[in-house]
Amino acid sequence: METDNRENNFISAVVYLHNDGIRAVQFFKILCEELDAHFTQYELIAVDDACTDDTVEQVRGWAKGLAAPLTFLHMSLYQRREPCMNAGLDAAIGDYIYEFDSTETPYPHDLIFKAYTMAQAGNDIVSVCPDHAQGSSRVFYSLFNRSSRSNYKLRTDAFRLVSRRAVNRVHANSEHLPYRKAAYAASGLKMSTLVFDGHVNDHAAGRFSLAADSLALYTDAGFKVSAGITLAMLALAVAELLYTLVILCVGNPVAGWTTTMFVLTVGFAGVFAVLTIIVKYLSLLVDLIFQKQKYLVESIEKLQK
């Protein structure tokens, strides 16, 4: 009798889709090949972020003969990656959950299972990351990691695997997850990284807003910037005082209009910069406390043989 050496843990794979077309089908074929080879039971969750092309029809046609269950989450409108992936996480029931933010596969396919073996070694969060990152991403992660309170450093990743304990931990800490990657790093659970030779294409839509929210919520970058502006303003005030005293002692005072306007302009610029940071924090607090609807799902479609 032949022994089945596949893993018995139930696996969920959450995949973000937005106008991926035929590439989505190719991705699911690769994913199912890896999951079939190593796991006895799994589910697929495809989050349709208001696709306007034939992505849904392509995947639906391919999934007709699929043995594993595939669940479509059709979002009511285009909401971008983080809310959609949170919706997929809420629908997932697996012991371990793969998070695929993109259907691009610049990594060796065997890393899908290697991430699981690394999780079995005691890691609740495993990120699969390229060894190269784009310039804007390097700047953001450098700033984030310098200001973060976590022992784990973030970097660009292609996909990640998280345990059910990690999902429960981050939801216990916060009902709303503006940035899952930072929430995992701040959870206190063990993280690890698999690195492959290559790079991941960054998607520009909503990146600046997400970066600002992440820095405000998960780091003390806002306080450091505010403190830096305050110190700069103090230095400017001291310099202006010394300049005024020198002019007074020399006995050749000038009209002072230029100096006054310079100080007022720079001073108000500093005040408004600090106020901008304060308003950003206040707007985040309003969203996190009063906005109970994290995402909008139009319908749920289950496809199974």
Image: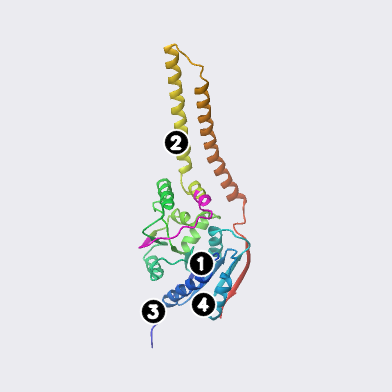
> Marks 4 and 3, how far apart in space?
18 Å
**Which contiguous range is marked in magenta?**
193-211
Residues at marks 4 and 1 touching, judged by CB atoms closer than 8 Å = no
Judge whether 255 appears above or below 166 on screen.
above
- Name the residue that disc number 3 marks: 5
- Name the residue that disc number 1 marks: 14
Judge whether 17 appears above or below 139 on screen.
below
Q: Residue 39 appears at what percent x and percent y?
A: 44, 75
- Name the residue that disc number 2 marks: 228
> Marks 4 and 1, how far apart in space?
14 Å
Q: Earlier in the sequence, mark 1 or mark 2?
A: 1
Judge whether 147 appears above or below 185 on screen.
above
Q: The disc labelled 2 sits on which kind of residue? A: Gly
Specify the label residue 68 is tagged with. Answer: 4
Residues at marks 1 and 3 touching, judged by CB atoms closer than 8 Å = no
Residues at marks 4 and 3 touching, judged by CB atoms closer than 8 Å = no
Q: Secondary structure at mark 4?
A: loop
Q: Residue 208 appears at what percent x and percent y?
A: 51, 50
Q: Quadrant of the C terminus?
A: bottom right
Q: The disc labelled 3 sits on which kind of residue? A: Asn
Residue found 45% across the figure and 13% down from its top: 248
Image depth: mark 2 or mark 3 in front = 2
Judge whether 10 appears above or below 123 on screen.
below
Image depth: mark 2 or mark 4 in front = 2
Q: The disc labelled 4 sits on which kind of residue? A: Ala
Q: Earlier in the sequence, mark 4 or mark 1?
A: 1
